[in-house]
């Protein structure tokens, strides 16, 4: 049986008053001059208890986490196909979130299709 909980250290963006007037940014690749500019700092938060969602999904009101069932989308073999994602997956995700939140409109602002190379 897998472990139900795990203690972890999570890193969060350090609060900074400058973010009231300036958006946080961090380049994750080097610029031509070799710099990776950033106006952020991160700080560790230790002892965060991580629960395995296979055993218990906490109430949304308590955790802000929800696991939604998307009927007919269990076949992940085509999730690497951008057309399938846009035509099938995203509309189903949008409707599931809309129903769950009892929202009038749900916009998916951004998504990324990852291509994994298996060796």
Image (spheres, rainbow, N blue to C red):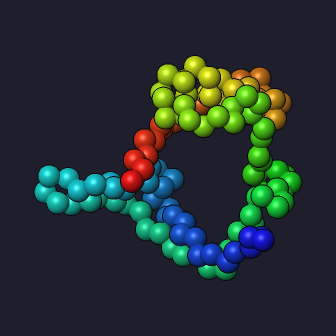
Q: How many marks?
A: 0
Toward the left, the furthest residue is 33
The answer, for residue 96, to whether it is visible in the render is no
Q: Which residue reaches farthest top?
A: 87
Spot occupied by residue 80 in the image (x, y as percentages of width and height): 49, 35
Residue 87 image point, x, y percent: 58, 19
Q: Nearer the viewer, residue 21 or 79?
A: 79
Note whether residue 111 is visible.
yes
Question: Relative to 20, is 50 above or below?
Answer: below
Q: Residue at image x 41%, y 63%?
A: 40
- In front: 41, or 50? 50
Q: Residue at x 23, y 56 (%)?
A: 30
Residue found 54% across the figure and 24% down from its top: 84
> Residue 33 appears at what percent x and percent y?
13, 57
Nearer the observer, 21 or 11: 11
Residue 85 left/right relative to 30: right
At a point 82% along the width and 50% down the height, the residue shown is 60
Q: Residue 113, percent across and down?
A: 47, 37
118 with respect to 94 (left or right): left
Picture quarter with the N terminus = bottom right
């Amino acid at each position: 049986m897998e472990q139900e909980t795990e203690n972890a250290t999570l890193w969060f963006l350090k609060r900074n008053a400058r973010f009231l007037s300036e958006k946080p940014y961090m380049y994750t690749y080097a610029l031509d001059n070799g710099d990776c500019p950033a106006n952020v700092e991160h700080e560790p938060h230790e002892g965060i208890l991580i629960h395995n969602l296979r055993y218990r999904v906490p109430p949304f009101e308590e955790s802000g986490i929800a696991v939604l069932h998307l009927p007919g989308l269990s076949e992940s073999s085509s999730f690497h196909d951008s057309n399938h994602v846009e035509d099938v997956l995203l509309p189903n995700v949008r409707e599931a979130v809309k129903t769950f939140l009892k929202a009038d409109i749900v916009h998916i602002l951004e998504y990324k299709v990852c291509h994994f190379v298996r060796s």
